[in-house]
Amino acid sequence: MSLQSRRRKANLTAMVLIAPFVATFAIFFAYPTLKVLQLSFTDSPLIGDGNWIGVDNYVRLLGDRLFYTSLVNNAYFVLLTVIPTTAIALGIALMISRLRGRLQALIMVLFFFPYILPVSVVTLIWTWMLDFQYGILQGVFTLFTGKPVAVFKNPHWVMPVIAAVTIWWTNGFNVLLFLAGLRNIPTDLYEAAKLDGATAWQRFRRVTWPLLWPITAMVLTLQLILQLKIFDQVYLLSKGGPFNSSYVLLLQVYREAFQLDHGGYGSAIAMTLVVIIVIFSVLQFQLLRVVGRR
Amino acid sequence: MIRNRKLANQLFGLFALLCAGVWMFPLYWAFVTSIRSEQNVVGGGGVLPDEFNLASYIDVIFRTNLMRWYVNSVGTAAITTAVVLLFGVMCAYALSQIKFPGRRLLYGVVLLSFMVPPQALYVAQFILMNDLGQVNKWGGIILPQLIVPVVIVVYKQFFDAVPKELREAAVLDGASEFKLLFKVYLPLNWGITTALGIVTFIATWNEFFLPFLVVTSETQMTIPVGITQVNDAFGVAYARIMSVALLAAAPVAIAYLIFQRKVTEAVMISSGIKG
Amino acid sequence: MKKALQRLFLSAAILGSLSAQAMAVDVEWWDFLAGGDGVRMKALIDKFNAEHPDIQIKATTLEWGTPYYTKVRTSVGVGQGPDIMTYHLSRIPLALQDGSLSEITDADLTAAGLTKGDFFDAAIKAASGEDGKLYAVPFDIHAIVLYYNKKALEGTDYLDDKGNLKGIASLEDFTTAMTKLKEKGVKAPLSYQTVGGGGTWRVFYTLFSQMGGELITGNEVLAGDNAAKAQKAIEIMADWRSKDLIPEQAEYEASVALFSAGDAAFHINGVWEVPTFKDLAAANKLGFEWGAVEVPQLLEKPATWADSHAFALPANKDEDPAVRQAALTVLGWMEKNSLGWADAGHIPAFKKTVESAEYQAMQPNATYATLAGHAVFDPRSKIAGVASPVYDAVDNYIAPAVHGQLPAADAVEQMKTELQGMLQ
């Protein structure tokens, strides 16, 4: 077989292998995405056709106060979740890696468990835990603030609490990623460090942290993208209130599209969010690479 | 000295157990609430379980189409998972092992698709499902959920890590790419397949909004959609709400407990992935 | 021979009935009715199905509020809606804008055995578009009422010798009464859903309307002195809250539970809770006697928030005329049997039911029947009505202001700006 015909055959095989995915991707993902992009330049209702209005929706967005509120809240939520969840996951992973055998497996299962729950179940449970009249956690609030707090109705508490629920729900996956990373660090490095008389903190700082950095960077990036897409928890727990203090971009998309029948404007907000996510994840990725190299 | 160390280890184990216990408390509390009578739930009962009342479970199981919803959920989630894994593994194999034109572009598009919030696409996908005649059918629930970019990313990382010698030897023996994929690469990576399978299954099982739009009759509902029908706006019904929540989560929880070793192992190996 | 003939007839009859069953038309029905309402509606549906072997209602109950209307909007949008559905008349303006509803012609009404004259004018008007075309058939009028606990009021000046509520004719009267009850040790003198949502909206809108307020004038939100009226309505509730006369952040269920547990002397809620208290009393679980009256005139004029459940037929349905006819038959039958619905506390929209002796004797419906003359419906606007931006604004601005988290003036200002922005 000539090189050329072998290459042709390999290409053909590749095409056959990727065809099913590419076809489903094109029909069920790319097509709807392009459709939404196209809608964002029209004044369409939720369902049905509209008129082409160019970039009017995007211009309107620039003057929309709720858009800026949502943008700020998205940023605040990222701040409240991304770094804390990464730190907590790392802490838990370090703790678990010190354990052995069955106990280790058990603890791992317990920390991972919330991750498998449907979001609606998670929010039902936490709504009950934090119920203003009967919530078992109200005792904790009373201890610190002197009285019960209706957390999802309170502008100061609402975002931190939603962030805490989110961390509880999704943290398990990050813990597993860190555990795997820790396992890949050769033990002789620690022993060498010990022989040199390094303290526990020094060992962490000089060995664990740099070698774990690729995993940390990956967790941070994944979390950034995920948390920018926050919707379900806010929708189910606070609906964006009180006075818009937990309003986020996807909630605005939902309201414009479904409640107000502004399919076009809703699409424009969604597309703006995609652009924001792309920009921030690229920026963060570059930043983390620079930090990692130092 | 050694004894001290052992004691320290045991104390540490105890501490870890305590942390995990605090972490699991919400689920414990949901369970305790669900086996109380409604009067007791709001009656200020203590933290410990003090009665074993299955009334709210019986109420939910017999007064709703719960069993039917289980069937729909298991069916659609299983089919979705199988298709996602099959298409994903094939595509990832090609991306990893065959140098074909456009593979960088394809991989870039896959990564980019992770950044599109699924909520933005629901309406467009729903209209598409209607055009394809899939409203109120399993197809309408399954088809839009077939794109899980993470599956391709993870499989590709794993295939990249398989030693090249293996492939060269097999090629010399005249094995086709398909044979290589299904007889060598896939069996080598059963662990990650299980893990990806479970993660995909969980995600599909938990999906709410799309099935909510697509399904128009009570018998076609999936669990997350169905349980919203059970929420009764009248009277205090916290025990009932907690039983519904736990019943909705039960099948996946049981599956996870059975396969938990595999999941852990697989996710752990997968972090061999470079960042 | 005779026997054989008989047998032949018998089998023919069986075959006939079998094929009649096979020919039965299925009417797909959606509603949002849970709880006490839901039980009574299911009873009506079962009765209909039993009486009509040729038409079978296939009912699906969906979650009330935003989920229901989201589902209707998307399904009807692609022609996959039900054959008949329940609808809030307050949602008609939005439905007209998005084209979800099919016009109900005079011929349709005739086919259902009805005429426009069978209904109260106000309801027909609310169910029609600007062009006078009818888009829904009203089924009831439901309003909020003032429930009171006779035991809690015992020994005060607010019960007459028959045990009926008296002496509340102004805001001062009401606040004084509640303050006295508070001093007497009543935990929550007045309970309603203070956390926001429908409960807070209904009380707000009632107070606002009693001052003659108009939420939307032409295309302007809270025009002129309406903003000041809205602010006053919020301040009244905030004053109650600061004196602890109404519960803090009470969810809907909790507000009902406060009353049924005897911890609240007054309760403002929809007539749909009548069956709840009726059933509890019948089961001897209530522990006190209760009554329900029209919300008293507290401010300048009597007014009570009201909405209306109606039946609507979705647009875009490419259907068999036989199914539409069957849906209309269902509709007509439901109206004529609406006494069973009145039992859920509602005031039927079908005049003949209201005029019937049975209805006139029904309690407490007859006591609060007067409210029909003072009913104020939600503003006719695409941003108002059940699960609309106006409802969101209640959670977002009014409820926080009632709880002192936001000055009333700011709440009104922000609400006005936000709603105005949505009217374009």
Image (cartoon, rainbow, N blue to C red):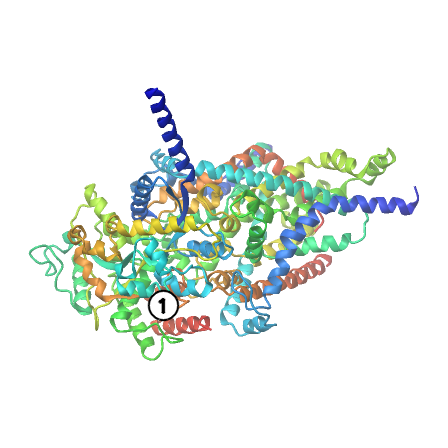
Above or below residue A279? Residue B231 is above
Query: In the figure, is residue C165 to the left or right of A34?
Result: left
Furthest residue in direction left, as rendered: C161
Residue for badge 1: C132
Q: Could you tell me which chain the residue with mark 1 belongs to?
A: C
Above or below residue C88? Residue A180 is above
Towards the viewer: C316 or C69 = C316
**Residue type pointed to by label 1:** Gly
- Estimate the x, y position of residue B100 in percent, counting from the top left: 81, 50
Furthest residue in direction front, as rendered: C1
Residue B211 appears anywhere in the view = yes
Query: In the figure, is residue A247 to the left or right of A57?
Result: left
Instruction: Give the residue at x 81% y 45%.
Output: A12
Towards the viewer: B39 or B152 = B152
- Estimate the x, y position of residue B236 in percent, counting from the top left: 32, 47
Towards the viewer: C13 or C327 = C13
- Estimate the x, y position of residue B131 in percent, counting from the top left: 58, 52
- Estimate the x, y position of residue A242 in percent, counting from the top left: 41, 63
Secondary element type, mark 1:
loop
Towards the viewer: C240 or C111 = C111
